[in-house]
Amino acid sequence: MHHMHQWSRPFGLVAALLVLLAGATPLAAQEASPEAGSRTGGLPVVASGLTNPRGVTWDPDGTLYVALAGSGGSNPATEEAPTSQVIGPWLGGPTAAVARIEDGCPVAVATGLPSARERTGGVLGADDVAFLGGQLYVAVDGGGPVHGNPDQPAGVYRVNEDGSSDVVADLSAWVRANPVAEVPFDFDPDAGAYRLAADEGAGALWVVEPNSGQVLQVTPDGTVTRVADLSAGHPVPDAIAPAPQGGVYVGILTPVPFPDGAAKVLHVADDGTVTDAWTGLTAVTDVTVGPDGTLYATELSTGNLEEPPFLVPGSGRVVRQTGPDRLEVVAGGLMLPVALEFGPDGGLYVSLPAIGADRGEGVIVRIAQAGVAATPAATPLAEVATTCTPIPETVVPPHAPATPGAATPAVGTPTA
């Protein structure tokens, strides 16, 4: 990580979220303890045993689903790209998955999705899930030849009832064929689909692509349309949520060193018009809308440093908007929170940590929200009393670590 302070240009999710989080893991390892409260701000853990958990959603029956980015693999990349020089070599494998939560533990819904690890330990894989028209879809950015998965592209996948998955939109190919206005210096053509938002009215999925900096729409027949090109200045859009007035909210991570107050949430209208919706935030990793229309966001780390490792372990927060550039802290003391969603029970569910859960150390916590109504018959998930076993297919075998030293988890409960 010695070279990072020499970089003056902003860089995208691949280099920002992954390299810098990986750079923070030695400190995170020192700060973390086996006690769940040390990384969850004392919030109840409702799901554990998760291998790099990301976005969540619920089916009509109230069952919780989560995207698992996996742990990469041992397949070398078969194509070079600018990102390969920045944080390569990439090592890929089919360790990403989609799981549903039963009694607090993950049960495989679909396995064998592409995952990739870069040299400092950051992982790309299955990063979000959404239901559209009753069909489950998953956003995958761990695929493609640059990531060591030449037979499985990055993009939007359909999850079938038998546990198999099909490519709906090959964004590895689309991104190569449709460059943004300002292609980033760390360009990763295989970082194609990070977050999803279902738009039932339009019959389409909104997709945010952080590395190139763009907002797309993908229809179930695979048609891809760019709605907004946000590439100017490489702002790193990494979060998306449907907006009640139409269009979507898009969260901005910001480049290194993630200055406090420099992140924001944009509104992107159906016609591509972009306006500021909420400013004064820090290192936004997800955004969601409360039942009353209030915006909520996860902040990866606060009180950030101007030198490596830039991030402060255990300083992540969930915040609520109280004005155009004002916020209220809903929960603090979180270890690198990465995804946020309201559940049908009225609670806020948060996935964490963003890095360091390669062997199932990841969890989902629940924040009770006073005054937020639950869907009829919806009940909160129970707190997990024991640590669950990760889905075996999501864990790289110990004899073939993708990164030297990866056997020591950066965050969470030590494994046996």
Image (cartoon, rainbow, N blue to C red):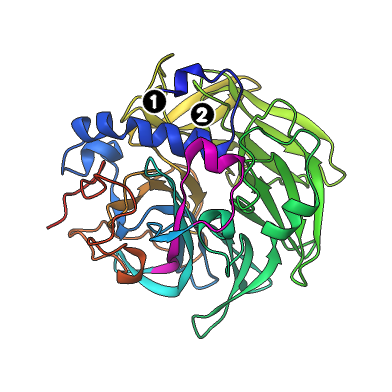
Local packing at callout 2 (Cα closer than 10 Å; few below 14, some 14-19, many 20+) is many
**Amino acid type of the residue tagged 2 in the rendering:** Ala
Q: Is residue 100 left or right of residue 250?
A: left
Image: magenta residue range = 77-100
Q: Residue at x 73, y 34 (%)?
A: 231
Seen in the picture, residue 41 relative to 102 is either above or below; the reply is: above
Q: Which circle's residue, 1 or 2, is located before the other in the chain?
A: 2
- Cβ–Cβ below 8 Å for labels 1 and 2? yes
Give x and y (percent) for residue 297.
53, 36
Quadrant for the N terminus in the image: top left
Query: How many callouts does the rendering have?
Result: 2
**Amino acid type of the residue tagged 1 in the rendering:** Leu
338 or 5, which lies in front? 5
Seen in the picture, residue 15 relative to 194 is either above or below; the reply is: above
Between marks 1 and 2 in the image, the one whose residue lies nearer the viewer? 1
Is 89 covered by the magenta stretch? yes
Q: Is residue 118 left or right of residue 254?
A: left
Q: For residue 205, what is the image quadrant?
A: bottom right
Q: Residue at x 46, y 65 (%)?
A: 65
Q: Is residue 225 left or right of residue 133?
A: right
Mark 2 lies on a secondary structure that is loop
Mark 1 lies on a secondary structure that is loop
* Label 1 sits on residue: 311
319 or 402, which lies in front? 402
Seen in the picture, residue 157 relative to 231 is either above or below; the reply is: below
* Label 2 sits on residue: 283
